[in-house]
Amino acid sequence: MSPDRRDPGTRRLPAMEAIVAVATPPGRGGIGVVRVSGGSLRGLAGALCGDMPEPRRARLVEFTDAGGEPIDRGLALYFPAPHSFTGEDVLELHAHGSPVVLDRLVRRACELGARPARAGEFSERAFLNGKLDLVQAEAVADLIAARSDAQARAALRSLAGEFSRRVEAIHAGILRLRVEIEAAIDFSEDASEGASRDVLARLFAEVSDRLDALLIDTRRGTRLTDGLHVVIVGRPNVGKSSLLNALAQNDRAIVTDIPGTTRDVLRESVLLDGVEVSLADTAGLREAADVVEGEGIRRAHAELARADVVLEVTDGGAAGPADLLTEAPAAARRIAILNKIDLAGLPPRREEREGVVTIALSARTGEGLDLLRAELRRLAMGGEADGAFSARTRHVLALERARSHLDAAHAALRYAAPELVAEDLRGAQQALGEITGAVSSEDLLGAIFSTFCIGK
């Protein structure tokens, strides 16, 4: 790590007020956990549990209210600072999982000086105390929200620091570039005289290659975390709703021979080999027959504007909807679906010509659906799920800014003063710092941690 990025445990803040929250999901269960962090917990533990337990040893105690009456019997665990999740003193109360019991424990802790925790405040304190960087803190939320084995494994890789280490390696490479450039500022009038052109060219190439590779993997991690948004479009009666039902393996959409049956956007989430795919079936693209259908078509065009993948469905001989896809993002991948091959007596197939993938299938019989599922998974992962880490859109945007600054620095090296080169390199470092939280604002932290569940 660079000198301004301290190792976990060395960035502890002054003792903060105690916070409390239920750390287990809402509802009834065999066990519920109430977590208290911060402040001086000995008095609170003494009043609530009879005494402070030994560090990291579960102790059976009776939890009591202000009048000494029992609330429940359960386990108390104490994790002294800095060896806890938050880096502060942490007391966990493991009671029976009745919402009434857990609420009484929270209210009792508040009577003893704690306050209810905000959403994500425990993870926020772990970040502020250097126990996690920002990527790892976000990975905690991603792990909790994981809906597949692939998502859970990816979140664990980010939590273990795989993503952060790659960011740090690029940061270190840019730091070396800055050292070379700023040495030229100090000791020469020309950067090329104070720093070897060959050395600078090699360093720029190494950092650029690492940054490009990380961008590819981060986009893949974002798709794995957020899912792939797939929009199904086509003219009426080409089998769009049948395709949605076939992929979702249920009768989510109404299927009839009447044009204009689908009037609104129908959405369904499915898991394809551990990859979440959000499917959106849209109204048939044509001139609207009435006001209601017209609104459905307007919504179809709006859905296209945020598509990752567009499935353009035809029944083989009908004209395709390509002339109606002007709203689709330029980066959206398009797959031509030739449906109803069972009626034409054709075999399922996948072919690619000039970068355009065409898949022939039958939504009614299921022939060829395996080809489409494999293609969607390939687009979602950009390769294999093994080795992927969880990521978010903000990470991609920060890496793109870093890439832009790096390109500007490389270009400026040929014609500009070395001070301008150094400034662009500093901008690239700052963009990378926003990913791990080495550079952050209160607004950014507030936006990130507000999406966490309370108790984490």
Image (cartoon, rainbow, N blue to C red):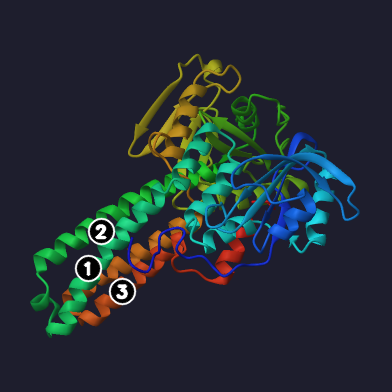
Nearer to us in this view, 176 or 300: 176
The amino acid pointed to by label 3 is: Asp
According to the image, label 2 marks what residue?
Answer: 207
Q: Residue at x 21, y 62 (%)?
A: 204
Circle 3: is it few (<14), some (14-19), or many (20+) Cα within 10 Å?
many
Give the mark, 3 or 2, whose residue is nearer the N terminus. Answer: 2
Circle 2: is it few (<14), some (14-19), or many (20+) Cα within 10 Å?
many
The amino acid pointed to by label 1 is: Leu
Q: Judge whether residue 261 can be spotted in this image.
A: yes
In the image: residue 403, left or right of residue 248 = left
Badge 3 marks a residue whose secondary structure is helix
According to the image, label 1 marks what residue?
Answer: 177
In the image: residue 208, left or right of residue 21 = left
Q: Is residue 192 above or below residue 27?
A: below
Q: Residue at x 40, y 50 (%)?
A: 163
In 3D space, how far apart are the residues under numbered discs 2 and 1 (Cα atoms)? 9 Å
User: Which image quarter holds the N terminus?
Assistant: bottom left
